[in-house]
Structure formats: structure tokens, C-alpha cells
Amino acid sequence: MDEERETLQRIVSTLVNKNDEIHNFIDMLNHTISNVQANSSNAISELDEEFDGLYSILHEMKGSMANTIQQEEARKIQALRDQLSQCNRALESSEELLELAVQSLDIKNPVELLEAARQIKDSVTVASAFRLSLQPKVSDSMTHMMVDFALEKRMLQAVKFLPVPKAPKIDAEACLVADNCITVSWRMPEEDSRIDHFVLEYRKTNFDGLPRLKGEQRWEIVDYIKATQYTLSGLKFDTKYMNLRVQACNKAVAGEYSDPVTLETKAFLFNLDNTSSHPNLKVEDTYVEWDSTGGKGQEKIKGKENKNSGQHPVRKSSRRSNTASPKRALARGSRDRFAGESYTVLGDTAVESGQHYWEVRAQKDCKSYSMGVTYRNLGKFDQLGKTNSSWCIHINNWLQTTFSAKHNNKAKTLCIPVPDRIGVYCDFDGGQLSFYNASSKALLHTFRTKFTQPLLPGFMIWCGGLTVTTGLQVPSAVKTLQKNENGLGCSTSSLNNVA
């Protein structure tokens, strides 16, 4: 009976998963149909705009060429009219001389006839009629203003849709995830000289398979990439994976997206556990600030509870169970808040294996703060570095600045400047806890031991605030320095000898 029930449960689980896949695919198909309709409408609108632009150019060219013909017509007519006017004036002068010559033939006196003939001869010599060209200055032909659109017609008839670029192919083996950066490389399936640029899209996800339509973050876009490689930098890896896809674009159209690639973005992500932090600490996600009124506020609340204890009896154990969260229980085993001078807050996620890294920045006016790791058994009155199960570096800016490494209530002074931002590197399996200048990656101090229990990031703050940056990968520079660190850092055994 149990075997049949287990078999049926597996079948039910398989059917549920398959139904979920089909639902997701149906959503994707409906979404694709909507996109096809919208994109088709956009394509028609763009086609109308292109042809309207072509008509506008042709109309403008027609007007310009017609104007040129009209100018040529006016020039020729004016030249012919000027020539016609000259001819009319020459003809008028010639007719006057003809009339004078005819009249002179009637002169009887030889002397007068001789004189008249001489005058007429001189007038004829300078007469414009005999210097006038009897050829038109311009021709009446306008054939040089004719156009032949045969070639252009063939070109227009050959107009087709611009070839859509093929989808690029992301080279997953060439992609690199390091230092909270992702370098993506891709190639075209064939050479295409008309490619103008590429578009890269990426989005975070917690699924290791193909991108899903529902329940996913929107795609982030990087446009106008000219090369076939791009590096996304300054990322916070607060999800397990990153989906990436690329499309090629020419001057007018974008091609299909490449097959999406999912890259693992493994990093240590945690928040600060405000359920067990000291009452004087104000905690929000990855920021903690010391508040001198916090403890007093808690005492007033406890006083009111004590006064009303007869009317509303509340057991301490039940009060804790109502306020405790699963993360708090995981972090400190359902202990009370830190108290006394242990102004401490822990991370809500434990380190149980592997190599991890996070960074801490203190406010400039912060008087005293510590950072490090601890086992879950840190007592409510314990301070980081003062137990045999906690390791930290401590900065004290009260009166004078001191910088020290602490473990098991022993300290070693670090004679180096305190950086603005400190990186914490924890190699659980290798038994190493190192602190770095987060900007220069210079080593500040190293603890070496064998960790026997899960570790929680720990922080102490007094008179100031701390900002913790998580979701970071171990920097490549730190990985390189780890190979050469032997003999450079201080071990826990050296602290055991410090008074």
C-alpha cells in the first residue's frame, strides 16, 4: 500500500511539474502572439514612413528639376528677345538709309550727288545691319533637360526588405564570472558586414534552466555595443544565476535574440539579524547604527510589562517564541538579545563550507567597532574576540586610534593605517580568516585555525554606524594573494602568547 502511494505521489509530482511547464509555455506563446501583432503594426508604420519619405524626396526633386527647366526657358527666351530687338533696330536704320539712297538718285547736280553718295557710303559702313549676326544665339532644343528613370526604376523595383541579422551565438565557455563582473562573449554564425551594433540583455534569476516568463525580473538592457564582447561590472550577486542574451542590429532592424545563456553567480549573501542584536543597535538589512536611547526604551517596555504582570501574565519562554524568527533561531539558537557592553549584531546566514567574502565600511566619526566571525554559542554578554570561539579585528577611535586583531581575549596591535573599507575573507575548509584593505587589497591580518562549527559574521559598533556589503564574490586579487600569504599574516597561536 505504501509503495503504491509513493508511486502515485511521484506521478502527481511529475504531472504538476509538467503542467507548470505547459502553463509557462502557453504564457510564452500568448506573449509571443501579442508581440508579433504589435511588431507587425510597427513594421507597417515604419514602411509607410519610408515610402512617405521617398515620395517627399521625389516630389522635391521634381520641383527642383522643373524649376531648372523654367530657368533655362527664361534664359533662352531673353537671349532671343534681346537678339530680336537688335535686329529690329538694325532693320529700322537700314530702311532709313535705303530711303535716303533712293532720294539721292534724283539729285541732278553732280557735285551734290557726289557728296550725298559719300555720306550714304559712310553711313552704310557703320550701319548695325551689316554687323548683325543672322544666326540665333540659342537653339530651341530642350532635349538636354530630359530625364531617364529607367535605371532608377529598376533599382526601385529591386527594393526588398532589409535582411534581418541572424541571431548571435553566445560562447558560454568564453564567458567569465569574477569580481562581481560578468564578461560575455559572442560571435555571429556568419560574416555580416551590415551589422551596426549589438544589444545585450541580462536579468537575475534563481532558476538554473531557461528563462521563465512569470515571476522573473525585467531584462536590463545595454545598447549600442560595437564589439562582440562586453563586461557587466559592479553587480551585486543577490540571486543564484544570471540570464543573458544578445541580438545583432543593422542600420534599420534588429535580429532575433541569441539562445539565452544562464551563468551561475555564486556569492555569499546575508543580512544582519535584528532579532537578536543589542537593544542599543538600530539594524536594517545590511546597516547597523548605535543608538544610545535603545536600551532605555527597552527598559521602559520591560517595566510596563512587569507592572501589568498581575493582569496579563506572560511567560518569558512564550514571549521569546512569539518574536523569534527562523533566521534568529538558526543564528543564535533562540538566545536572548545581546546585552550589557556587547553591542553586537550577527549575520543571519552561517558559513559552513567554502570561501566567502564581504566588506564593511564605518562612518567617519565611529568611535569603536569590530568585525569578524563567531560560532553560534557566543553569549549574550560576550564580545567579539574575547572568547575562544570568535575572531575579529577591532578599531578604537576613542581619544586615540588603535587597530588590533583579537581572539580568545588576547589582542595583537596592527601597526598599519585603518582603511576606509575593510574586506573580510573566510576560508572555512582551509581554516583561514583574513582581513584586507578593500580598495587596495593589501593584507591587514590573517587568523589560521581549524573551524569546527558553522561561522556567523559578527559586528560590534559603539557611537557610529557600519554598512556591510554582501553578495560579493572573492576578488581575484585576494585569491592571488592567498597563494603568497604564508608567513605574512599573524596566526592564532601568536595571539595566544599576547597578554
Image (cartoon, rainbow, N blue to C red):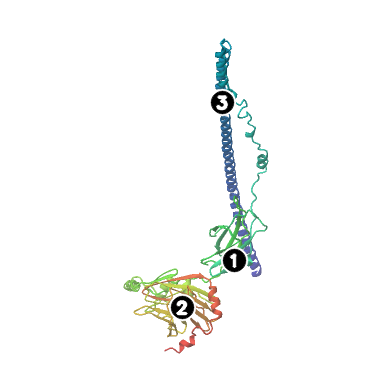
Check disc 2 and report the residue beneath it. 372
Q: Which residue is mark 3?
A: 81
The reply to whether the C-beta atoms of the residues labelled 2 and 3 are less than 8 Å apart is no
Q: Could you say where residue 33 lies in the image, as x and y percent from the top left?
A: 60, 50
Between disc 3 and disc 1, the foreground one is: 3
Q: Earlier in the sequence, mark 2 or mark 3?
A: 3
* Quarter of the figure that contains the N terminus: bottom right
Mark 1 or mark 3, which is nearer the start of the sequence? Answer: 3
- Give the distance between the C-alpha atoms of the residues marked 3 and 1, in whole angstroms: 85 Å
Q: Earlier in the sequence, mark 2 or mark 1?
A: 1
Residue at the location (57% across, 29% down)?
79
In which image quadrant can residue 28 be found?
A: bottom right
Amino acid bearing label 1:
Leu
Quarter of the image with the C terminus is bottom left
Front position in the image: 2 or 475: 475
* Snapshot quadrant of residue 219: bottom right
Dot 1 corresponds to which residue?
Answer: 263
- Asked whether residue 440 appears in the rendered view, the answer is yes
- Note whether 457 is above or below 141 in the view shown: below
Element type where label 3 sits in the image? helix
Q: What is the distance, in whole Å, between disc 2 and disc 3 at their CAs?
A: 105 Å
Amino acid under disc 3: Arg
How crowded pointer 3 is (Cα within 10 Å; few <14, some 14-19, many 20+) is rated as: few
Residue drawn at the location 66% of the way across and 69% of the way down: 3
Distance CA(mark 2)–CA(mark 1) = 30 Å
Where is residue 26 drawn, in percent x and y?
A: 61, 54
